[in-house]
Image (cartoon, helix red, strand yellow):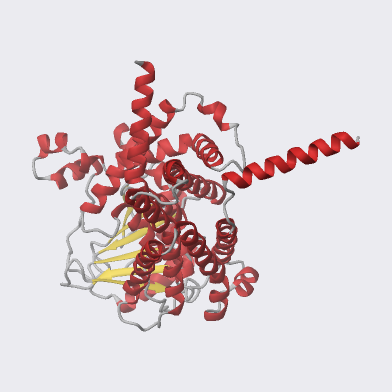
Amino acid sequence: MKEGFRQAMAWLHTWTGLIFGWLLFAIFLTGTMSYFKEEISHWTQPEVPVRALDPEASLALAQSYLEEHATGAGSWFIRLPDAREPGLSVGWRAANAGRRDFIDKTLDPATGAELAPRETRGGNFFYRFHFQLEMPHPWGRWLSTFAAFIMLLGLVTGIITHKKIFKEFFTFRPGKGQRSWLDGHNAIGVLVLPFHLMISYSSLVIFMSMVMPASIIASYGDNSRGFFNDLFGTPENVKVAGVAAPLLPLPSLYQKVQEQAPGTRLGWIEVQNPGDQNARVRFTRHAGERIAYQRGGGWIFDGVNGTLQGSSKLDAVPVVISGGMYGLHMGVFAGPWLRWLYFFFGLAGTAVIGTGLVLWLGKRQLKHAKSGTQPFELRLVEVLNIASMSGLLIGVAAFFWANRLLPLGLEGRAGWEINSFFLLWALSLLHAVLRPGRRAWAEQLGLAALLWAGLPLLNQLTTHAGLLQSIPAGDWAMAGFDLTALGCGLFLAWGAGKMWRAPVTAPKRAARAEKAATASLIESEVT
């Protein structure tokens, strides 16, 4: 019974991993990239310069710009620059405008001059794709959430299946074909197992209200908005008094926030009813201030006399737990070194999925190796493996190449970047259908290596923000992207080289073994 249970878990681990492995590979890879979402967005908009951080000066510049260009707006929104997002962002909704008619501008944080960065979705595309899959709401979220459940199921069944899992962690036999792939799969899986469990479970918690809404419906019916208002509170909207009054300088209110919480980082600043007697200024904490994500909160000041109207309160324990899961999953709180650790653990998760797909196919291909042919279903899995892994890497690189090569004034430019991503990904599927398996791997990995390794050169030739400029300027987000792309290109080139070499067949292995034995015998006779 015990052995039968383990066999059942092995079957479940194998087949759920295969059916959802291709989707999970894309989700994990784009989710891993999202840990550097801001840095990717900065690379895709090289027109935004990096400046020394001065929150008070930036606030003064933002207020001056909004007072000139956003008179009559019901609210202003300001996002201060930081080490990861160098631009000073301001936004407003014009009077009598609709909900979608929001104006968003990026300013130079040193001069207040309006910048014109190229149209792109940057890192937000990969972040949104990670959990929405570019599908209509809410179907993409449903599918990605179900995939997260399958990932959690795969982790649990994998633990049950490998009863000597920790012993296998210290076992790696290179150059042994399928055995090496299995050793690598087990070792990487054990190394980052706690991280994978956290990521999979926390993703389910994030969308729990969507996938398990029974208790909310029982209490609130169709009024789900009422549930969230009771859970997180609703910001007070003060009505316009109709009496003109000058708004206090925002840097002075910023100083009051620092008196309340010295050294705190701020996310958004919202000004309600600017220029009115009932103006209110809300300062919200930066999401990276603590592990647990907090909705709303912060400090609210009277915009005319500067009196404190309210401040953030302690959240209920369930809200803190939920926010903690969200914060752990997103990793916004992480500093540079911890963020890189998140990144490498995410790559390890992607590798576990990829090696699992390769193992499933390789094990079954061995049974048909002598005949020289393979059934249609194995060929289908082989094609999907190639397109879902090497093809996806080509598509991601194509997105960045399109960002640099598309005309800056092209209408719908951001959409064409995304179209380039999907077009190259689809072409990789066609290429995998037309070419033999190992040759298709080699050619696609070789192309991916060229595209990734060529990104730093492309950036140098098409912008003023290449490595020769970004490193002396201390723009390590820009330089880090280029260096990471170069490293990815070199790694993929190594993988392509492995695939270009002819595999060692069983007769060749026997000949090598016989030759080694003969050499050993001759050496023993000589000595």
Quadrant where the N terminus sits is: top left
Residue 45's place in the image compared with 160, above or below, is: below
Q: Residue furthest toward the left?
A: 221
Q: Is residue 243 left or right of residue 324?
A: left
The x and y percentages for residue 375 are 35, 49
The x and y percentages for residue 282 are 32, 56
Query: Would you say residue 323 is visible in this rendering?
Result: no
Is residue 111 or residue 492 the one in the foreground? 492
Residue 373's place in the image compared with 176, above or below, is: below
Q: Quadrant of residue 249?
A: bottom left
Q: Is residue 513 left or right of residue 156?
A: right
The x and y percentages for residue 417 are 37, 72
Quadrant where the C terminus sits is: top right
Q: Which residue is at a point 42% across and 66% down the rendered structure image?
A: 59
Q: Quadrant of residue 353?
A: top left
Q: Residue furthest toward the right?
A: 527
Q: Which residue is at a point 42% across and 76% down the rendered structure image?
A: 117
Instruction: Give the total of numbered labels.
Output: 0
The x and y percentages for residue 128 are 33, 57
Q: Is residue 347 left or right of residue 321?
A: right
Query: Would you say residue 433 is visible in this rendering?
Result: yes
Is residue 257 or residue 396 the one in the foreground? 396
Is residue 115 or residue 413 the one in the foreground? 413
Residue 318's place in the image compared with 443, above or below, is: above
